[in-house]
Image (cartoon, helix red, strand yellow):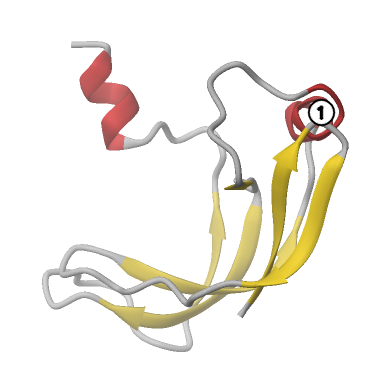
Amino acid sequence: MKAMVLYGPGDIRLEAVPEPKCGDGDILLRTKAVRLCGSDIRMISYGHPKLRYPQIIEHETTGEVAAVGKNVSGYKPGDRLYVSPAVPSLQAMQSRL
């Protein structure tokens, strides 16, 4: 698959990258469209102290379900989804506890 990979401020490249694996509790989304927000533009332009390069950045995306993990219910391949950037990751929520 192809992705825009950020290598540092001002250095973003379109590259072939391995397709992610769908874990038991995951949904694999085949991206159809991506929107860059102000935060993305700042990271691309100036970097961010918490980014580890190279990094694929995008958190506002829409697409079609390509695969679902065995522990996922309510979704099936072919469903169309929008990923809300306002939902914190489990890792981010745990770090606040």
Instruction: Work out which quarter of the rendered image holds the N terminus and state it.
Output: bottom right
- Residue 3's spot in the image, x, y percent? 68, 66
Viewer-side residue, 74 vs 39: 39
**Pointer 1 local density, CA inside 10 Å: few below 14, some 14–19, many at least 20:** few
The structure residue drawn at horizontal position 60% and vertical position 16%, both measured from the top left corner, is 49
Image quadrant assignment for residue 66:
bottom left
Is residue 79 rendered to the left or right of residue 96?
right
Compared to 62, does 69 lie above or below?
below
**Mark 1 lies on residue:** 38
Q: What is the quadrant of the C terminus in the image?
A: top left
Tell me if 44 is positioned left or right of 58 in this view.
right
Query: Disc 1 marks which amino acid?
Result: Gly
Question: Looking at the image, which residue sits at the far bottom?
Answer: 78
In the figure, residue 36 lies in which quadrant? Answer: top right
Q: Residue at x 71, y 43 (%)?
A: 7
Q: Which of the pair 17/78 is nearer the observer?
A: 17
Name the image quarter holding residue 93.
Answer: top left
**Residue at position x 15%, y 69% in the image:** 24
* Image x and y of residue 61, in percent: 64, 57
| Left or right of residue 79, residue 68 in this image | left
The structure residue drawn at horizontal position 41% and vertical position 71%, both measured from the top left corner, is 20
At mark 1, the secondary structure is helix
Looking at the image, residue 1 lies above or below residue 48: below
